[in-house]
Image: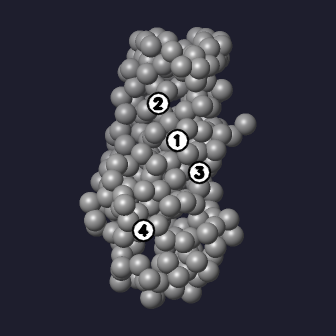
């Protein structure tokens, strides 16, 4: 067993005291957006083995009108014990009464990055000026339908003064990771949360947006208003925010919230 796995298991065992009194052997329904997915998938087997609970997971965007987006799923009545997505979107769901007020727990911070197809030239995005040139020179640009894409299309591109110039060659990607589109040649440049870009085969990661125009998204978890297993839901959220999950969070390209 490697040292990282050993440390994770030791930390997990220590953190089990947090979960005392939680239900055992239950199906826990989780809805999760892409930004936290890699870290989540790394650690949930340990949680399932320790608690006997089975996590039944649905994946979707934090926002947007796609049929599989988390807000649309909840609106049509799909059940969820735990909801994990961008904090701003979670707050909207709390305001709508779809997630329990007071249940929000922040899990990680995420920055926006860029990929190109594997083997392609990596353009310069190290400064605001270089990023602007790269965007203007690109043949095609893809961005997500979730928090990062909303920022790019409604704030960053207008701020750079190029929104009209790149509009025709820009695509908002629904129900699919941006890196997958880039890998198959559907776009030259792809922008999304770094944690959603790092593990996509067929792409090369270029780097983050320059700090002057970077947008940090906080990923948060909350308990669904109609949760059938609220105790197990609380236990899962405590685990994901505990030191037991920190190594997987960092490995996925997210910043741990201490």
Q: Secondary structure at mark 1?
A: loop
Q: CA distance from mark 2 to mark 3?
A: 17 Å
Q: Which one is earlier in the sequence, the residue at label 2 or at label 3?
A: 2
| Residue underneath mark 1 | 252
Q: Which one is earlier in the sequence, the residue at label 1 or at label 2?
A: 2
Residue at image coords 28%, 67%: 186
Q: Secondary structure at mark 2?
A: helix
Q: Are marks 2 and 4 in contact (CB under 8 Å)?
A: no
- Is residue 216 at least partly visible in the picture? yes
Residue at image coords 59%, 51%: 110
When asked about the image quadrant of residue 128, the answer is bottom right
Q: CA distance from mark 3 to mark 4?
A: 25 Å
The answer to whether 68 appears left or right of 246 in the picture is left
* 206 over 14 or under it: above or below: below
Tally the marks: 4
Q: CA distance from mark 1 to mark 3?
A: 10 Å
| Residue underneath mark 3 | 110
| Residue underneath mark 4 | 121
Tell me where residue 258 appears, x and y as whole percent. Answer: 73, 36
Q: Disc 3 vs disc 4: which is toward the camera?
A: 4
Tell me where residue 66 appears, x and y as whole percent. Answer: 33, 58
Q: Nearer the viewer, residue 103 or 170?
A: 170
Q: Which one is earlier in the sequence, the residue at label 3 or at label 4?
A: 3
The answer to whether 186 appears left or right of 28 in the picture is left
Within-10-Å neighbours for mark 4: few <14, some 14–19, many 20+: few
Q: CA distance from mark 2 to mark 4?
A: 31 Å
Q: CA distance from mark 1 to mark 2?
A: 9 Å
Q: Are marks 1 and 3 in contact (CB under 8 Å)?
A: no
- Is residue 174 at least partly visible in the picture? no
């Amino acid at each position: 067993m490697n040292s990282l796995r050993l440390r994770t298991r030791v930390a997990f065992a220590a953190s089990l005291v947090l979960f005392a009194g939680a239900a055992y052997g239950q199906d826990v329904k989780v809805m999760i957006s892409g930004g936290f997915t890699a870290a989540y998938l790394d650690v949930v087997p340990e949680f399932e083995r320790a608690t006997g609970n089975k996590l039944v997971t649905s994946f979707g965007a934090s926002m947007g009108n796609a049929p599989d987006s988390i807000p649309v799923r909840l609106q049509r009545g799909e059940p969820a014990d735990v909801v994990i997505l961008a904090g701003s979107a979670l707050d909207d769901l709390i305001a709508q009464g779809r997630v329990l007020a007071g249940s929000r727990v922040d899990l990680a911070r995420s920055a926006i990055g860029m990929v190109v197809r594997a083997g392609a030239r990596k353009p310069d995005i190290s400064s605001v000026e270089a990023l602007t040139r790269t965007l203007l020179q690109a043949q095609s640009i893809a961005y997500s339908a979730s928090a990062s894409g909303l920022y790019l299309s409604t704030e960053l591109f207008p701020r750079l003064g190029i929104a009209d110039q790149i509009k025709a060659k820009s695509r908002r990607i629904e129900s699919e990771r941006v890196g997958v589109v880039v890998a198959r040649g559907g776009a030259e440049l792809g922008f999304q949360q770094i944690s959603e870009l790092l593990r996509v085969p067929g792409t090369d990661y270029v780097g983050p947006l320059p700090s002057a125009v970077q947008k940090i998204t906080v990923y948060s978890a909350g308990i669904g208003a109609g949760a059938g297993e609220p105790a197990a839901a609380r236990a899962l959220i405590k685990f994901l925010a505990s030191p037991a999950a920190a190594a997987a969070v960092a490995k996925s390209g997210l910043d741990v919230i201490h």
